[in-house]
Image: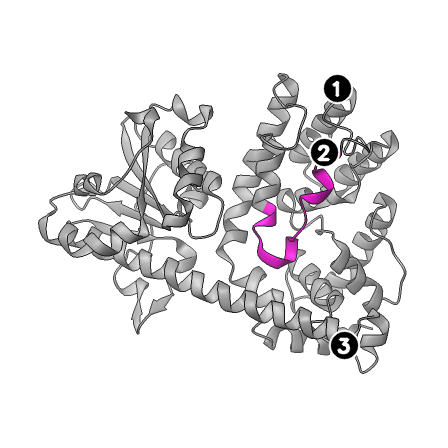
């Protein structure tokens, strides 16, 4: 089995449209999601403790966490569905049953603080014992983003891929079967090192691609997966279209990064871009040649520095090496999580007031306004958040560079909401 898997993994990693290459290695939303989801889980726990969780999925902090997960493109498509409230079935049974809600909150709190696999497994078994409708192994997708080296994600395609590779018949909805799958995945992953990663997202994305028929195990793989040829062709065509769309989105994101870098440098600032974007290039120009290789010393906790280093663009004053301005480019990722990163930065810096910006396509303007009007952002004293539309940035880039003296020139094209008026 290990020999066959080794050959499979080699082909898998060479495929530029595999989930390994389009999500695990290169997708910036995956890297940004970890802290956002952890913070979201903390909000879920607090809302349950203090009675503000609500009686529906919509508008709950759980919706935000699942939104961060489902934005991980095709690999987590549908991850939120098990958490939708279904009135006739009362599933999941955590919105109207206060005891079940409390159990869910305690489970998340225990998993959040767990520091080893044994504790996590113990909490899973305990949760399973309560037999709460809707709290099956779909929750494992949340656990993955809390403990990526201990808990693999879990969905239908991954189970299908697992059954093909390991010649098994595991099913989706059982915690017991999830734990059995997890044990095999971890043991196999250890034997395969260093081909994949200690982060279980790598081997799970392999299972996903095998499960949807993207990568063949052998000549009999269609029979093993029970996939009809036309269905397979549609699956592969859809994946190709998704990859092409992701390339277009990434290119526009990169174009806006370059524009913000150009404007910042013309205004006299040093510019830092997200650490995982340093090596990216557009039209033969590389960001690393026009931006700082690292942030100046910020005297912040390491986890905050890690989050700050993923902010898309930061302008830094040359005279005192202080952060002046920061930008999150929200082409397709969660607006809310981008706001959180900016708020995290502002609240962690010196006791000053900052002006930070979201930069987004015109099509997302209503979504931005809705997020900026959330009550949780109204009382923030350390930062004023505004947004700049792509069209305005493209149109006025030259004028900003020519006539601006500092970041305040951006206020000419930036927009706020009525909560800042």
| Residue identifier under label 1 | 98
**Which class describes the residues within 10 Å of circle 2: few (<14), some (14-19), or many (20+)?**
many
Residue 415 image point, x, y percent = 28, 37
Point out the stretch of residues depicted in magenta. 69-86
Q: Nearer the viewer, mark 3 or mark 1?
A: 3
The circle on residue 229 is: 3
Q: Is residue 283 visible?
A: yes
Measuring from the top left, give residue 112's x and y in whole percent. 65, 34
The secondary structure type at the circle numbered 2 is loop
Query: Which element type, helix, strand or loop, lies under badge 3?
Result: helix
Up the image or down, 301 lies above or below 236; here it is above
**Relative to residue 146, is residue 249 drawn left or right?**
left
**Residue 198 visible to the viewer:** no
Gap in angstroms between the C-alphas marked 3 and 1: 48 Å
Among numbered discs 2 and 1, the one appearing first in the sequence = 2
Q: Marks 2/1: CA distance?
A: 15 Å
Looking at the rendered image, the quarter that the C terminus falls into is top left
Q: Residue at x 83, y 46 (%)?
A: 173
Secondary structure beneath dot 1 equals helix
Q: Above or below — where is 177 with respect to 228? A: above
Crowding around mark 3 (Cα neighbors within 10 Å: few <14, some 14 to 19, many 20+) is: few
Picture residue at 31% right of the left edge, 63% below the top: 287
Location of residue 66 in the rendering, given as x and y in whole percent from the top left corner: 62, 41
């Amino acid at each position: 089995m290990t020999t066959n898997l080794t050959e499979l993994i080699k082909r898998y990693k060479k495929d530029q449209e595999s989930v390994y290459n389009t999500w695990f290695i290169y997708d910036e939303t995956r890297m940004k999601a970890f802290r956002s989801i952890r913070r979201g889980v903390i909000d879920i726990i607090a809302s349950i403790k203090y009675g503000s969780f609500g009686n529906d999925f919509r508008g709950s902090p759980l919706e935000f966490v699942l939104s961060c997960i489902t934005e991980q493109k095709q690999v987590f498509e549908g991850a939120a569905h098990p958490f939708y409230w279904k009135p006739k079935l009362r599933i999941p049974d955590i919105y109207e049953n206060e005891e079940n809600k409390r159990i869910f909150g305690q489970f998340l709190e225990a998993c959040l603080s767990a520091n080893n696999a044994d504790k996590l497994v113990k909490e899973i078994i305990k949760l399973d014992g309560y037999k709460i409708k809707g709290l099956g192994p779909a929750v494992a997708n949340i656990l993955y983003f809390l403990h990526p080296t201990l808990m693999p994600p879990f969905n239908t395609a991954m189970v299908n891929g697992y059954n093909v590779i390991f010649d098994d018949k595991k099913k989706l909805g059982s915690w017991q079967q999830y734990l059995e799958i997890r044990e095999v995945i971890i043991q196999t992953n250890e034997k395969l090192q260093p081909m994949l990663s200690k982060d279980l997202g790598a081997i799970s994305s392999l299972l996903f691609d095998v499960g949807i028929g993207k990568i063949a195990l052998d000549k009999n793989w269609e029979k093993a997966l029970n996939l009809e040829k036309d269905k397979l062709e549609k699956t592969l065509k859809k994946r190709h279209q998704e990859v092409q769309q992701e390339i277009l989105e990434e290119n526009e994101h990169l174009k806006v990064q370059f524009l913000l870098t150009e404007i910042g440098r013309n205004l006299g600032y040093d510019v830092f871009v997200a650490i995982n974007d340093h090596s990216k290039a557009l039209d033969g120009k590389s960001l690393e040649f026009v931006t700082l290789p690292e942030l100046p010393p910020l005297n912040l906790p390491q986890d905050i520095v890690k989050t700050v280093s993923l902010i898309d663009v930061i302008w830094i004053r040359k005279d005192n090496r202080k952060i002046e301005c920061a930008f999150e480019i929200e082409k397709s990722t969660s607006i809310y999580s981008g706001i959180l990163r900016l708020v995290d930065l502002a609240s962690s810096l010196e006791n000053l007031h900052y002006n930070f910006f979201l930069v987004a396509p015109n099509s997302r303007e209503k979504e931005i306004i809705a997020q900026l009007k959330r009550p949780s952002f109204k009382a923030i004293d350390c930062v004023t958040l505004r947004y700049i539309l792509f069209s305005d940035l493209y149109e006025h880039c030259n004028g900003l560079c020519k006539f601006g003296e500092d970041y305040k020139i951006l206020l000419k094209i930036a927009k706020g909401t009525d909560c800042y008026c």
